[in-house]
């Protein structure tokens, strides 16, 4: 390894040496110690190396949270390979696009999601290797078969590098692969350890999917601290209450409406008494209810994105209710005007970031990367303002990045509008986000039909759901005969939103 490098492999070796018998991961009734995890990672890295996986090769994985998924992150770090975890909520067409874009050497899928590859098999003809988690139906070879037989463990990849490619929502109609490095993820983990005072005795409840930066962040935060993670395949409120009580869980990261559902299932809240830190995105009412129910716990608010490897601001919500907290350690944040000049406290502008957590760029998108990194800053596309005490206040998205976040997922209007306009009856469509009590934000669409065409909102909604992930389906859909226009004839999006929001 390099003289000054420190990678996830170093963390794995350190943990296995210092507290080998301490639990690292819990999956139902299975417990994996830090020593066991290193053994599992080395074995998987050897098997993948035998299949020809090396530095820079992409590995697509579509699976629920499971031990093998966690092993893959370690093995990818060992080999210097790039894991491409795909959101299984996406449609088969969306998954096919991401797979083609990543050009992987290997695809890994579990039994729940492998049919998407079987039904669209011709689109994946160039993929050399297929591994199934719990299945061995062609073209998949069972993981146990790959792990059987002796294979030499290759030396760990020397130095830092991209660990994961996470495809963000489609700005121009197609998602872009954000390249996130080991050093960025480790820097973010150290920031969270400091902010939440994470110690080896902490235990996290981790149901957020490992294809999401927040799910990966929490896992690495606890791992780097030598703490344990209770990993769930998916979030279930009743099961979550049982796990938090039985495992004495102290940390939880969530997106609305998870916390509200957890509180509903917990009744008087005594089963949640072990919680001390919850963080994520939720409504002030739900946060207040949580801190009233769990009086020894604290909800941390923050701001971040995949491109910054996670949170870049954070603070207890109660310190400045409504804000996104203050900048974390090792991050420089500014709010700038259209010319990238600083703006005074209280004035809104675009949030820009510098620091070790900033991603490496977008896969095969040099122009987008150059635009995002202009003038020595990562331009988040989000607007905000700092107050006199250094708290960041979120002020919505910039016009170039009108992102909608239903339940923590990223949705760009352009991709929903494209799906709507594929319907034979729709001539024009405008999509934007509106406040939603349950999900934080919901998708609203305003459409004009072609002359003489007839369609119901139910029919259109079902059509969109069949072409995209279900969470991208508009919750509110309005049919109208006219929309406000600019002088050049284009739809005035601002006025449309003001009229219909």
Image (cartoon, rainbow, N blue to C red):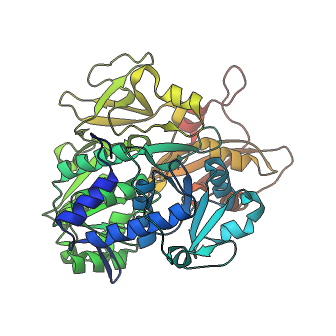
16 or 429, nearer to the observer: 16
At which x and y percent is residue 373? Answer: 46, 27
185 or 429, nearer to the observer: 185
Image quadrant in which you'd find residue 385: top left
Lateral position of residue 248 relative to residue 209, left or right:
left
At which x and y percent is residue 139? Answer: 69, 71
Residue 234 in view of the camera: no
Residue at 52% over, 68% down = 63
At which x and y percent is residue 141? Answer: 62, 74
Q: Is residue 402 above or below residue 371?
A: below
Residue at 32% over, 42% down = 2
307 or 227, nearer to the observer: 227
Image quadrant in which you'd find residue 376: top left
At which x and y percent is residue 396? Answer: 42, 36
Lateral position of residue 133 relative to residue 183, left or right:
right
Lateral position of residue 400 relative to residue 388, left or right:
right
Image quadrant in which you'd find residue 36: bottom left
Q: Is residue 381 above or below residue 164?
A: above
71 or 443, nearer to the observer: 71
Q: Which residue lies most toward the bottom here?
A: 29
Q: How many marks?
A: 0
Residue at 52% over, 26% down = 370
Q: Is residue 77 above or below residue 262?
A: above
Q: Is residue 497 above or below residue 385?
A: below
Q: Which residue lies most toward the right here?
A: 452
Residue 80 in view of the camera: yes
């Amino acid at each position: 390894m390099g003289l000054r490098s420190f990678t996830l492999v170093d963390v794995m070796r350190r943990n296995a040496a210092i507290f080998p018998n301490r639990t690292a991961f819990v999956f139902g009734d299975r417990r994996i110690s830090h020593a066991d995890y290193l053994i599992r990672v080395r074995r998987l890295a050897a098997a993948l190396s035998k299949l020809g996986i090396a530095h820079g090769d992409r590995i697509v994985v579509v699976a629920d949270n499971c031990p093998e998924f966690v092993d893959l992150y370690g093995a990818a770090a060992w080999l210097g390979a790039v894991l491409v975890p795909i959101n299984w909520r996406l449609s088969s067409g969306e998954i096919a696009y991401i797979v083609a874009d990543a050009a992987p050497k290997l695809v890994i899928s579990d039994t729940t999601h492998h049919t998407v590859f079987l039904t669209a098999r011709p689109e994946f003809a160039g993929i050399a290797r297929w591994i199934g988690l719990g299945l061995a139906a062609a073209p998949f070879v069972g993981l146990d078969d790959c792990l059987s037989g002796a294979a030499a463990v290759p030396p760990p990849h020397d130095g830092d590098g991209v660990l994961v490619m996470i495809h963000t929502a489609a700005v121009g109609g197609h998602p872009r692969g954000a390249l996130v490095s080991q050093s960025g993820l480790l820097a973010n983990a150290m920031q969270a350890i400091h902010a939440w005072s994470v110690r080896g005795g902490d235990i996290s409840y981790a149901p957020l999917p490992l294809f999401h930066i927040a799910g990966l962040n929490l896992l690495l935060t606890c791992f780097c601290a030598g703490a344990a993670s209770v990993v769930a395949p998916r979030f279930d409120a009743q099961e979550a209450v049982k796990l938090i009580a039985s495992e004495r869980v102290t940390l939880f990261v969530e997106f609305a409406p998870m916390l509200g559902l957890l509180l509903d299932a917990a009744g008087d809240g005594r089963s949640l008494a072990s919680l001390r830190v919850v963080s994520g995105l939720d409504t002030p009412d739900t946060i207040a209810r949580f801190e009233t129910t769990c009086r020894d716990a604290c909800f941390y608010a923050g701001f971040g994105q995949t491109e910054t490897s996670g949170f870049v601001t954070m603070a207890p919500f109660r310190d400045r209710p409504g804000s996104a907290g203050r900048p974390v350690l090792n991050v420089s944040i500014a709010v700038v005007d259209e010319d990238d000049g600083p703006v005074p406290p209280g004035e809104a502008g675009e949030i820009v970031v510098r620091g070790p957590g900033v991603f490496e760029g977008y896969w095969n998108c040099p122009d987008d990367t150059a635009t995002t990194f202009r003038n020595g800053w990562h331009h988040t596309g989000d607007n905000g303002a700092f107050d006199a005490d250094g708290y960041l206040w979120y002020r919505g998205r910039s016009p170039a990045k009108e992102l909608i976040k239903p339940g923590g997922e990223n949705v760009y209007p352009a991709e929903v509008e494209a799906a709507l306009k594929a319907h034979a009856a729709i001539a024009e469509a405008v999509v934007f986000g509106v406040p939603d009590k349950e999900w934080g934000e919901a998708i609203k669409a305003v459409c004009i039909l072609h002359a003489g065409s007839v369609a119901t909102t139910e029919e259109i909604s079902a059509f969109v759901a069949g072409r995209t992930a279900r969470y991208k389906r508009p919750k509110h859909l309005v049919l109208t005969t006219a929309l406000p226009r600019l002088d050049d004839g284009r739809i005035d999006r601002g006025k449309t939103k003001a009229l219909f929001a």
